[in-house]
Amino acid sequence: MSPYLIVPRKGHDISRRQISPHALVTLYRLRDNGFIAYLVGGCVRDLLLKRPPKDFDVATDATPGQIKRLFRNCRLVGRRFRLAHLHFKDEIIEVSTFRAAAPPEEEDEDLEAEGRGEVPPHRRRHLKDEEGMVLRDNVFGTPEEDALRRDFTINSLAYNIADLTVIDYTGGLRDLRERVIRPIGDPEVRFREDPVRMLRAVRFAASLDFTIEPAAWEALCRLSPAIVRASPARLYEEIQKLFLYGSARRVFDLMDRSGLLEALFPRLGPWLREDPRHRQEIQTNLEGIDDLFRNGTPASPALLLAALFGRELEARTVAVSRGEGIPHQQALDRVCNEALKEIARTVAVTSRSGDGLRRILSSQPALRRMPPRRPAAVAARGEFADALAYLRFKALAGEEYRVPLAWWEAFLSGVPPERIPLPAREGTAEGKDKVRKRRRRRRRGKPKGRAQQGEASPAVPGGEGSAP
Ligand code: ATP
Ligand code: MG
């Protein structure tokens, strides 16, 4: 047993008033029935940092079956390890039984294969609780083992309802004070065990404004290619937590520097190396994503995809459309399909978000056309808000997007379309002339393709259309 720190109520700032009443009810009922009951994980960290916790997790020595008998609102979930979810009106409190670290996957098969006889109970993968449920890959453990199996020291603190103390098994309190993300144990081992911990390290460093401890950072940079071993579904979930909660810009920088970004999204590597402006554009987009979060209107996953991949996809679309002489929209569909297929190999982006990305990008020519055609119809499209948000990101980085953005903002604020001034650049005789000439030529040459081409070629100099 390692020595550990117990901080009495007077020595810390966690007050019961900050704890969800449902979590308190849960803790007290467990304690009153003779069980150990701790608040654990992110909520203890957040309470100590005076940040509102996302959720309250409870750990106890009661088994899942015992928890179920104590709480009528309990549902047992999870295949790998049975967790109890207590359903309250607007909140779910997760209650888990203390457990020890999972032994490596093949360990017990190895032991048996080596002919060392029966695997001792505490090493067994297939453990049954009293209800006959199989607890795979896990064993119940002591409170200390439960703390040591967690990812980072700051996530391993416990708040004991019995005496209102904070229990620190790993040096988490010191690391909270020093603002350090430190894996529990050998960083390399812990990142190999579960590569998603690398993304979690980045997430906590970015969102809490902490630094990743140097040895862990070094291991993370070295092991970043292994991130692709995590399941695509889990990675998609983690990507959303990384980028949609107000610190996308910092997350991006850490992922970029560590190699995680290119490991997850190989197509971004060459794009970022091609031109330093590409990185700045993505950073600007992500600052826009963070602003949306701060204003209480978090970005959709589709808009996040556009922020990350939009510019590269648009550039590729122009190249394909020009190179093969196919309409912009057709090129865009193909480029998006290819990209989404490639991304899906590592990150399970939902088809809904993928479609959203495609629609955001295909709306851009209609948004940039000045004056817009049938603006009310354009604004009524489902993807309009996201498409305009994406245009707004681009306007932060480039002059040429500001005029159409100003037009749409005037339109949305109720100015009648005919009273919205048109861009000075196009208002000049020269600009108008050019537009007229291009239109006339097209009308003669390709009567049928006009609508499609028109859609593809915004009448903005330097637009993304497939120029003849
Ligand atoms: P958030 O505020 O984002 O919810 P959190 O720290 O509560 O952060 P959760 O994903 O809710 O994160 O996990 C709860 C706790 O479970 C963590 O604080 C940590 O102790 C433990 N944990 C979660 N994921 C892992 C992991 N991959 N490896 C080890 N421990 C983990
Ligand atoms: Mg949590």
Image (cartoon, helix red, strand yellow):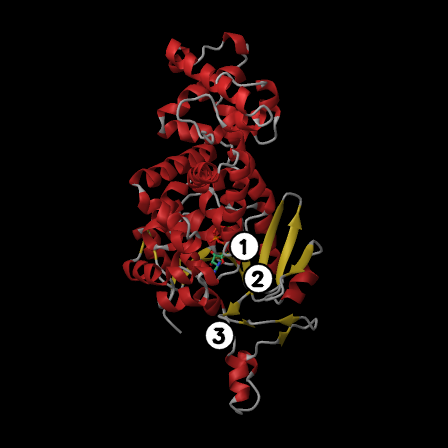
Mark-to-mark CA distance, 2 and 3? 21 Å
**Label 1 crowd (10 A; few <14 / some 14-19 / many >=20):** many
- x, y percent for residue 18: 49, 44
Closer to the camera in the image, 261 or 441: 441
Please tell me whether residue 296 is drawn above or below residue 144 in the rendered image.
Answer: above
Residue identifier under label 3 = 104
* N-term-proximal mark, 2 vs 1: 1
Name the residue beneath numbered marker 1: 57
Tell me the number on the disc at residue 96: 2
Which is more toward the observer, 214 or 368? 368
What's the CA distance linking mark 1 and mark 3? 25 Å
Does residue 209 show up?
no
Q: Position of residue 333 (x, y in %)?
A: 55, 40
Left or right: residue 391 versus residue 220 is right
Which numbered dot is residue 145? Answer: none
Residue drawn at 54 percent across, 49 percent down: 349
Q: Is residue 179 left or right of residue 29?
A: left
Q: Secondary structure at mark 1?
A: strand
Q: Are marks 2 and 3 in contact (CB under 8 Å)?
A: no
Classify mark 2: helix, strand or loop: strand
Given contact means CB atoms under 8 Å apart, are the residues at marks 2 and 1 in contact? yes
